[in-house]
Image (tube, grey):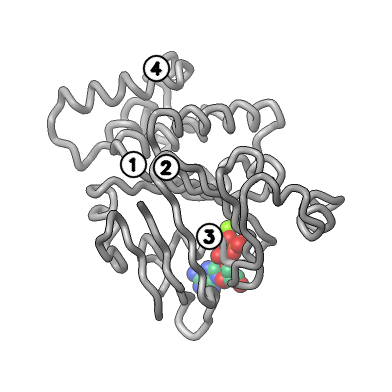
Amino acid sequence: MLEIKDLHAGYEQLEVLKGVSIEIAPSEIVAIIGPNGAGKTTVIKSIFNIADVTAGKIIFKEKDITGLKTHELNEIGISYVNQGRINFGNLTVRENLEIGCNLIKDKEVIEKNIEMVFEKFPVLKERQHKLSYGLSGGQQQMLALGRALMQNPSVLLLDEPSLGLSPKLQKELFEIIHKLRSDGIALIIVEQNAKKAIEIADKTYLLEDGKIVLSGDKKILKDKKIKDVYLGGRY
Ligand SMILES: Nc1ncnc2c1ncn2[C@@H]1O[C@H](COP(=O)(O)OP(=O)(O)O)[C@@H](O)[C@H]1O
Ligand SMILES: [Mg+2]
């Protein structure tokens, strides 16, 4: 459904991605893992036209979508939750969700989507009239996810969703991700938690220095390199 083809991208003179190809099918979870600075976030930024794409293509449902603007991507069903789960702290939980829906003008649809998010994240319903800055880290992540879901995406890109969450909240988050997939959403997850990412993903890509050096399904947990470097002491 979404295909990144031989992507070269970076920032002005700096080439970060040196020929990256990634494919995701409907209702699939794809994980991108790799060390800090490898270019994982740049893959997402390239899709969203925040990084400079110098070669290669991004194809969605057989159309070339390279260079589309954020709102155009949202309109065709691609949404993005950045690293750091950024919400509008001085708006209430409900207002944050309404903002996530700015492409949809029909009030009934907005209400329906808010109810859908509240069903997934009951704690957001309880706190809907509270300012979002008072939420815990886990709740902030749910709100950021909820905001992206307000756009009814068919592909959701999550950058380091588990970063800074307690092990218990990480577990809950991965359960939520699993559920979203059952609802028919395809997910691309950039993760520093390599083990969890590989376990949840249908396909994992290991990115090092701007290149995919390994890819595969859960079997790559047994790969020597993955074991030594990503599941060892450092990760
Ligand atoms: N806006 C930017 N301008 C210049 N260089 C950047 C910018 N963002 C990231 N980089 C550089 O691009 C490289 C890859 O970064 P990034 O994609 O964020 O890596 P990762 O997400 O894998 O940690 C790093 O060397 C980083 O310093
Ligand atoms: Mg990153």
Report which quarter residue 193 is drawn in. top right
Lower position in the chain sequence, tag 4 or tag 1: 4
- Of tags 4 and 1, the one toward the viewer is 1
Q: Amino acid at mark 4?
A: Glu
Q: Secondary structure at mark 2?
A: strand
Q: Image point 82% across, 57% down: which residue?
A: 224
Q: Closer to the N terminus: mark 3 or mark 1? A: 3
From the viewer's perspective, is the residue at label 4 or at label 2 nearer? 2
Which residue in the structure is indicated by mark 3?
A: 41
Quick one: SS at disc 4? helix
Say whether marks 3 and 4 touch (CB < 8 Å).
no
Q: Give residue 106's position: percent from left, percent from top.
A: 13, 30
Label 3 within 8 A of ligand 2 by Cβ: yes
Left or right of 117, for residue 165? right
Mark-to-mark CA distance, 4 and 1: 19 Å
Reading the chain from its start, which is encountered first: label 4 or label 2?
Answer: 4
Q: Is residue 180 left or right of residue 71?
A: right
Residue annotated with mark 2: 186
Look at the picture and state if 232 lies above or below 57. above
Q: Nearer the viewer, mark 3 or mark 1?
A: 1
First in sequence, mark 3 or 4: give its number.
3
Q: Give, as a three-letter code, the residue at label 1.
A: Ser
For the point 52% across and 48% down, the residue is 30
Disc 2 to disc 3, how far (Cα)? 18 Å
- Tell me whether circle 2 and circle 1 mark residues in contact (CB < 8 Å): yes
Q: Is residue 2 above or below residue 147?
A: below
Residue 82, percent from left and from top: 47, 49
